[in-house]
Amino acid sequence: MARESLLIRTLVELADNLVDNYDVIDVLTVLSDRCVETIDVDAAGVLLAWPGGDLQFVASSSESMKVLELFQIQTDEGPCVDCYRTGEAIINHALNADDVRWPRFSPEAIAQGFWAVHCLPMRLRGQTIGTLNLFRSNQGLLDIEDVAVAQGLADVATIAILQHQSSMDASILNNQLNNALNSRIIIEQAKGMIAQAMNCAMDEAFGRMRAHARNHNEGLTVVAARIVQGELGAQELDQPKPPRAKL
Amino acid sequence: MTSLCTSDRVAKSLMELEMIVGEGPALDVTRSGEAVSEPNLAEPREPRWPVYTPEALTIGARAVFGFPVRVGGVRFGALSLYRVTSGPLSAAQVSDGHLMASVIARAVLAMQAGASEGELLGEFHGHSPLDFRVHQAAGMLAVQSSTSVKDALVTLRAYAFSTGTDLSTVADRVVKRMLRFNPVEGGWIEESSA
């Protein structure tokens, strides 16, 4: 599919998602997936700033991306950390194994198969609330349109967080960030339960939960919370790709 | 729900009031899992707590706030705050409220796991809520031992404390299926390297 039509489809899908009681993590995961499809990158992820300033992982297109994002948070070093601190985009940064800028991050990223990184700030009224991160397995340059599309998608991610629940004052923003981050923990707890009960990998556990949420038109976090609270068994989840939900 | 501890007489009376009348910020927070704010009890923007509000004003509160004490899907209760003057919390104060609520949740987990004083401190320095493997491992452990995720979070910590191992390391081994918990066989089992 041509990039324009992919992009239009993505924006329509996101706009469709941003209604009523949508799930922030779900929307940001869709956004990460679509970044990989519409921009010439191999993995995408979103980090948000925990109230107080620490970065926190919220969504990614793959588990290896997530590992790299967590690695940066733990070592307090890497492109996403720099992008958040400065509020400036990092575009087309080629990695090499003896990188002086990120001596710990670069070898780790290369080991996971990534050779170039791009990070875009998620900004609101002068404040950076997180970053959209795009990793590539080759060092070719992103073209100018790709960069514009990526920043557009980063802005959509910002809106997704802010729009969640209605009002806009600063204290409510902090509550929303906190809820988004706690949602991520609920999802990880539920993934662990599914992975154990179904004897599958974490990625597959996440896929099952997401498919179930979609089929039943429920928020991802709602489904995860029901699993954690023991109201919904891992065995009761739909298969990852059923044609239609059973009623 | 019961009131565990309070900072002063007013806070104590407010908590007791909530328990008696069955409505108020802490109960709302515990039910919804969301933070609650009423910056002006005398003229609330949205009328709620019809029995609680006039009594709370008499006790001396002018504004009340509640923060969820939780770890992911595990809800412990609420951190309730009051003010003798009306007015909202600043953004920084809201952040601090969430931070304190998170410290309380983790302190409860660590204490239930039998942490010593030094280990309790380690709970706040050694790792952070960033470490999702701990939460994945708790989920796995809950299923292995047929307990709640909350008990699994305690069990993980208890094992880390008793073996002198870092919590992240224990979690990592559970997620990699090198370590599992079997209640029938009496506890933790190391898998021989696969």
Image (cartoon, coloured by chain):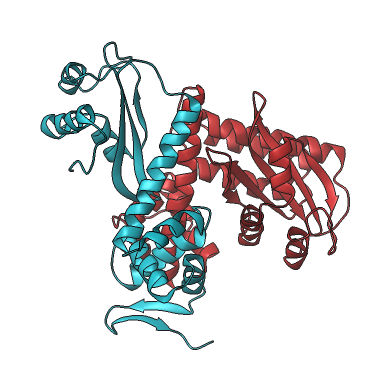
Q: Is residue B10 positioned above or below A224 on the image?
A: above
Q: Name the foreground residue: A53 vs B126.
A: B126
Give x and y (percent) for residue A185: 46, 52
Tint of chain A: red
Give x and y (percent) for residue A227: 35, 56
Give x and y (percent) for residue A226: 34, 52
Task: Give me the chain that's cyan.
Answer: B
| Residue B48 seen by the camera | yes
Count of residue discs: 0
Left or right of B106, for residue B57:
left
The furthest residue to the bottom: B192
Left or right of A12, for residue B47:
left
> Residue placed at 35% from the left, 25% from the top?
B37
In which image quadrant can residue A156 be found? top right
The furthest residue to the left: B20
In which image quadrant can residue B41 be found? top left
